[in-house]
Amino acid sequence: MEEKIEIKKRLTGEVIFSASIDCEPGALPSVKLGLAVRLAIKSRANLGGADLSRANLNGADLGGADLRGADLGGANLSSANLRGAYLSGADLSRANLGGADLGGANLYGANLYGANLSRAYLSRANLSGADLSGANLGGANLRGADLGGADLSRANLGGADLRGANLRGAYLSGAYLVDGGQRSDGYRFVGWVKDSILQIRAGCRNFSIDEARAHWLATRAGTPLGDETICILDHIEAVAKIRKLI
């Protein structure tokens, strides 16, 4: 059954793309909108600021798409390809992005409150200033991601890979991370768990807790900075045990 579906701006209601889709009788509006979005992307339409809330885009190829400022709240983007997509300022609150590929995507200032990002690939994604409060990032690949200034309060980061991630200025209250604070020379220490092993992120360095101790004992033993570092590591480990992260 052929039907005409219009994609509109979220704020003005202006029609920015019109698609004729073939769908089963009684298909849900979310499915119809998802089919229209696929056609729009195939036609290289600019969907910046579009109202795509609750669209069913499971497994869709949206690589490199311009979705800046779009409303994707509650959308199903599980296993979707969003590699290199432009999603700065987009509303992805409570969206399902489980297993999605967001490698290198620009999510600066995006709203990902309560979003499901479990097992998502976010390597080198720009998440600076993003709202990830309450998000599920369990098992996500965040290697080299920019999380500077992001709100990670109450986020689930169990099993996430944070190697090389920038957490400077991130808000970590209630997250599955242990903030060790800033060393006197400006390095910030963060503990996280991968494969049941406590990991330490300090500046650009990534170690297991045992490797971290060995490194700083070998390079800073007997110095005030070395003593300070061991205190920070002991604190992170103790808090991780109290929280039953390890």
Image (tube, grey):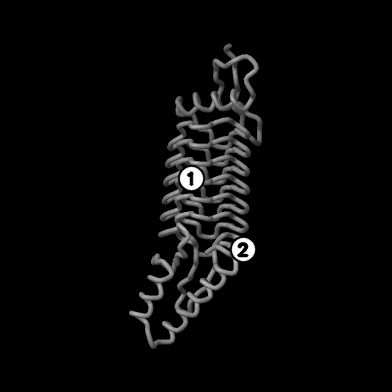
Question: In this figure, which residue is indicated by the disc labeled 2?
Answer: 173
Helix, strand or loop status at disc 2: loop
Binning the other alpha carbons within 10 Å of mark 2 as few (below 14), some (14 to 19) or many (20 upward) gives some
Vertically, is 62 above or below 226? above
Tag 1: amino acid: Ala
Q: Nearer the viewer, residue 20 or 188?
A: 188
**Residue 123 percent across, percent down from the top left:** 42, 50
Farthest left residue in view:
218
Question: In this figure, which residue is indicated by the disc labeled 1?
Answer: 120
Vertically, is 223 above or below 157? below
**Considering only order in the chain, which callout, 2 or 1, is on the residue closer to the N terminus?**
1
Vertically, is 123 above or below 229? above
Residue for point 48% across, 45% down? 120
Binning the other alpha carbons within 10 Å of mark 1 as few (below 14), some (14 to 19) or many (20 upward) gives many
Give the image quarter of residue 187: bottom left
**Residue 115 percent across, percent down from the top left:** 59, 45
Farthest top residue in view:
1
**Residue 140 percent across, percent down from the top left:** 48, 49
Tag 2: amino acid: Ser
